[in-house]
Amino acid sequence: MRHLIDFGDLTRQEWDDLYARADKIIDHPEQYLDVCKGKVMASLFYEPSTRTNFSFQTAMLRLGGTVFGFADPRSSSVAKGETLKDTIKMVSSYADVIVMRTPWEGAAKAASLYSEVPVINAGDGGHMHPTQTTADLTTITRLRGTVDGLSVGLCGDLKNGRTVHSLIKALAKFKDIRFFLIAPRDLAIPDYLRQFMRDNHMPFVEVTGLEPVIPQLDVLYMTRIQRERFVDPLEYERNKGIYVLTRSKLSRARENLLVMHPLPRVDEITVDVDDDPRAVYFQQARFGMFARMSLLSDLANQPRKIPGPVEIGHGPICHHPNCITQTEHYLPPLVKINGGVPCCGFCDTPLDQE
Ligand code: CP
């Protein structure tokens, strides 16, 4: 692995190795104090974050490395109109690894084309959030012993929820998982992911009601309705507050259910659930720090590599309003095939749906 842009970039073996190291770090953090000594992590957060930003920073500090960067792009030359390419060329000449979060889908992929050092996608718009997935899988594996064979409910904004998109990509690498996709019709998973699940023989049902399926679940992964991703504010108003998990709704759930949430939550889990032993979302956030320590101990120690020349593009290659190619017109016209359909190589939007 050179960059982590999409969980699909990892093989199952790479994930198993990453988890095995995270598991050891959780039990023996004192053995990893110098693993990144002398290494520097750039933390480029173009969008708000609590968990991802702070857990990456603390992960690097706990490994003996150091951190620089911004949590508000207005404090950098981005505010003067600097392109993503130029920012990345500069930052990658200063740092050993780059962690970046942006509102633009495909931005981490774009950055990886120009970076001398590994780029880690810490969330690109409503597209992907692979390091959240490392937190999620670590949580399930530590607490249940296995990911295989579970019934997993994914609930909320499955259209815009990047954590769900990455988790689906990851769970394709495991066996015998049954999926309940719980979302209003407006916020169902994107077509390319539905096709991905079919192509990978991942059995799923799509339902709009949460309560009827709760008793069947081993994992309930709640997500918030992602207000900042809605182009139409009325669509947000129609869907906000649609799912609320309460303690009384958990009365019919399995004793060993894991209630997970990438956080932040708004109103989709009431605070009285927090004290239920099945609620593991705060533990999940802490496991995320250890999973990121495991990831950084590999990627921050990779040799520097000058990227080859990149074809110059001349405008957006897809019409997704949040695709990185909408603003960075020099990006090459990358196309990938998802389930036989040509898609934008940055944001995965099918090109034939424009
Ligand atoms: N789960 C997650 O990505 O949280 P933050 O937005 O606070 O980083």
Image (tube, rainbow, N blue to C red):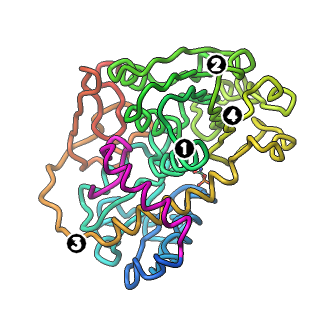
Q: Nearer the viewer, mark 2 or mark 4?
A: 4
The residue under the point 31% across, 63% down is 118
Kindly report the distance in space between the C-alpha atoms of the residues bearing marks 3 and 4: 44 Å
Q: Position of residue 9 (x, y in %)?
A: 31, 45
Figure quadrant of the C terminus: top left
Q: Position of 56 compared to 197: left or right?
A: right
**Secondary structure of residue under mark 3:** loop
Q: Is residue 187 above or below residue 332?
A: above
At x 42% / y 22%, what residue is drawn? 202
Q: Which is more N-terminal, label 1 or label 4?
A: 1
What residue does disc 3 label? Answer: 304
Q: What's the amino acid at mark 2?
A: Pro
Q: Which residue is mark 1?
A: 145
> What's the distance in space between the residues labelled 2 and 4, CA to CA?
23 Å
Horizontal and vertical percent for residue 58? Answer: 56, 71
Q: Which mark is residue 257?
A: 4
